Amino acid sequence: MELKLANKSYHQYLSKFFGQSDIRQHYQIIIQLSRFGGRMTQKMLCRNLNIERSNMVPIIDTLQNNGYVTREMNNKDRRGKLVLLTEKGNKILESLETTFQHFEANIIQGLTWQEMYNCIRVLKVINMNLGDILSEDKLDLTTAM
């Protein structure tokens, strides 16, 4: 329940920050691209953000139509496309980084670095375990009820 409430508060914060921005739902793509030097394959974006390819294509289309990214042929794999940050994408990234630094500075007040480390570690383990359950089809809801 606490995780659900924290997630809700986080999304309310993001909604307040983004307002009517045209990247509000797709900021993760821009952040991910920045971590890889402003260019990644669509396949790598899908894998890193756990987004299905069929869902990623319209997201990248939207970001491209709004001028945040471009696509170009991947010389290493002609079937794939590279997604690149544009100048406009880099400008919005600066704003995103400032906002997230402010956010992080405020949410960790009252926590020691050990508590923060343990929280992140626990969330990573939970995420991995959930991923394992989903990928291995271990979840059988008929026997859980």
Image: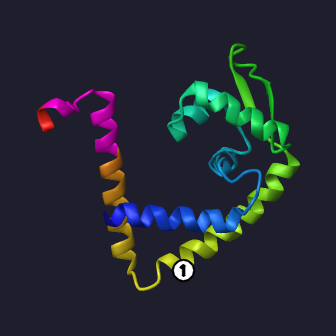
Residue at left offset 65%, top offset 49%:
25
Q: Is residue 4 left or right of residue 83?
A: left
Relative to 126, residue 1 above or below: below
**Image: magenta residue range:** 128-142
Magenta stretch: includes residue 36: no
Q: Of all residues shown, which one is farthest toward the top?
A: 79
Q: Is residue 13 left or right of residue 75?
A: left
Percent position (x, y) of residue 119?
A: 35, 66
Find residue 81 and report its image quarter. Answer: top right
Q: Which residue is mark 1?
A: 106
Q: Is residue 128 left or right of residue 103?
A: left
Magenta region, main secondary structure: helix
In depth, the one of 35 and 25 nearer the eye is: 25
Q: Is residue 28 visible?
A: yes
Percent position (x, y) of residue 60?
A: 72, 35
Display coloring: rainbow
Residue at left offset 70%, top offset 48%:
30
Identity, as a three-letter code, of the amino acid under mark 1: Asn
Relative to 65, residue 82 above or below: above
Magenta stretch: includes residue 141: yes
In depth, the one of 142 and 105 nearer the eye is: 142
Dot 1, how many residues are within 10 Å of its Cα: few (below 14), some (14-19), or many (20+)?
Answer: few
Residue at left offset 63%, top offset 63%:
15
In depth, the one of 59 and 43 nearer the eye is: 59
Secondary structure of residue under mark 1: helix
Relative to 93, residue 41 above or below: above
Find residue 105 and report its image quarter. Answer: bottom right
**Quadrant of the rendering where the N terminus is positioned:** bottom left
**Quadrant of the rendering where the C terminus is positioned:** top left
Find residue 73 and report its image quarter. Answer: top right
Percent position (x, y) of residue 63?
A: 77, 41
